Amino acid sequence: MTTNSAPTSHGRFARPQNARWQRIRESITLRRILVSLVLALAVGVPLAFTVKEDTAPPVPLDAAVATVFPDPENLQLRQSDIGIQLRNTYQFVGLAIDKYPIPEDQLSVVTALNQYTFTAGPDKDITEFTPGRHCASATFKPLNGTDDQIRTKTWCFEFH
């Protein structure tokens, strides 16, 4: 009777190895383990720190304001409109940009939306905006409100 196993140092016979498991054990090397770990980290770490941005528009802190533009969070083109859209229960009083009051006849008004905007241009008091930070302030009051009920919403933004 012939045995494929050789005696071990303890005098017992080793079990024959399955050829498939032998190939797997030979293919697993320290180098392959390290390369796999580095690749997993290279892919996993950036994914772990990726922040999903909320696509919903920012909620204004004043309930009277539906939205302001340009968006205070993003860099804007200098030709962008500057304005405000109020809830329909509020009345627009005025708009100032960098503390300069904009005349009413230079505003674009969309009455149905209660939206008031200014765009710099050749026939306007502000012909163009310089790159950098600018701030706008809109004043408004409740419909049929008195002047002592006037409130102000101020927001700032960056132009290219």
Image (tube, rainbow, N blue to C red):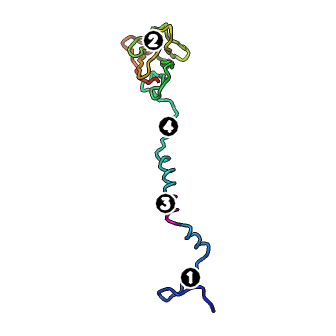
Between marks 2 and 3, how big is the CA–CA gap?
A: 62 Å
Return the residue found at the far right: 1
Residue 153 painted magenta: no
Between marks 3 and 4, how big is the CA–CA gap?
A: 34 Å
Tell me residue 4's x, y (percent). 60, 85
**Disc number lying in front (3 or 4):** 3
Sequence-earlier tag: 3 or 1 = 1
- CB contact under 8 Å: marks 3 and 4: no
Q: Badge 2, how many Cα within 10 Å: few under 14, some, many 20+?
A: some
Badge 3 amino acid: Leu
Between marks 1 and 4, how big is the CA–CA gap?
A: 58 Å
* Element assignment for label 1: loop
Between marks 3 and 1, how big is the CA–CA gap?
A: 31 Å
Sequence-earlier tag: 3 or 4 = 3
Q: In this view of the protein, which residue sits in the foreground, 55 or 60?
A: 55
* Element assignment for label 2: loop
Tell me residue 90's x, y (percent). 46, 16
**Disc number lying in front (2 or 4):** 2
Which residue is identified by label 1?
15
Sequence-earlier tag: 1 or 4 = 1
Sequence-earlier tag: 2 or 3 = 3
Which residue is identified by label 4?
53
